Image: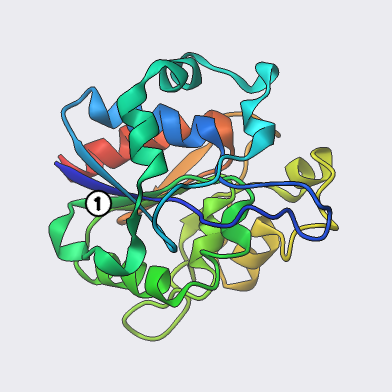
Amino acid sequence: MNVLFVLTSHDKLGDTGKKTGFWIEEFAAPYYTLLDKGANITVATPKGGKAPIDPSSDTEDAQTEDTRRFKQDEKAQQVINNTKKLSEVSADDFDAVFYPGGHGPLWDLAEDKTSIELIETFNEQEKPIAFVCHAPAALKHVKDAQGEPLVKGKKVAGFTNSEEEAVQLTDVVPFLVEDMLKRNGGNYTKAADWNVHVVQDGNLITGQNPASSNKVAEMLYAAVK
């Protein structure tokens, strides 16, 4: 099983002067879930090279078994420090694609034409496409074969407006994931803040928050199998 992970290259948290990037747990949990099941994982970013880690995901209270494993795993660190350039990967070489979150994707992956085309190609090939937390931002401009928003009429999940409020970034982010998914016609679903919530509609798998990342990977694996 060959799975492509797509991470953000964006590291600036709006005009706050603070850093952002991808959320470690949302990479680490799915990475090890799939790796331990024998998957080959390739990681790509819009710019290639080192993917920026969101400092907020690197605090002591954000650590999990998987993030601690990542910290000790030199091979995984190398993968993050040497990502492939998104323009150099092809959907033809993979069985599925997975987008971890963090706030970074709201700025770059949401608008990245290469990423948009890549998701559209995976979808045309009827391969699983999975996103967690803020990563559904990457679906903002993605269309289906009929030229409609890909999420239109589909059950979707993603970081909730109330979760964004809780982390006090509602006025910092370029758009809210929940609002965008609804605006694009998605049948938006959610659980209570910070609870595990993942939905699958056809080949589209979306999870609400960091707690949901492991389940997204499990469902992705089942979908490919």
Say which quadrant the N terminus sits in: top left
Residue sitting nearer the eye, 17 or 210:
17
* Number of numbered labels in the structure image: 1
Q: Examine the rendered structure and indicate whether residue 28 appears above or below residue 202.
A: above
Task: Say whether residue 212 is visible.
Answer: no
Applied colour scheme: rainbow
Q: Residue at x 19, y 67 (%)?
A: 125
**Number of residues whose C-alpha sits closer than 10 Å to that of mark 1, classed few (under 14), some (14–19) or many (20 or more):** many
Res 118 seen here: yes
Q: Name the residue under label 1.
A: 96
In the image: residue 18, left or right of residue 214: right
Q: Give the vertical position of 58 relative to 44 (above or below).
A: above
Observer-nearest residue: 15 or 181? 15
Identify whether 139 is placed above or below 2.
Answer: below
Query: 93 or 223, which lies in front?
Result: 93
Q: Locate residue 152, reporting x and y percent.
A: 49, 71
Tell me what residue is drawn at x 59 percent, y 38 percent.
209
Residue 204: % across, % down: 37, 55
Left or right: 93 with respect to 67?
A: left
Location of the C terminus (image quadrant):
top left
As helix, strand or loop, the secondary structure at mark 1 comes to strand
**Position of residue 122 measured from the top left corner of the image (x, y, whole percent):** 26, 65
Residue shown at the point (57%, 71%) measured from the top left:
185
Q: Report the amino acid beneath label 1.
A: Ala
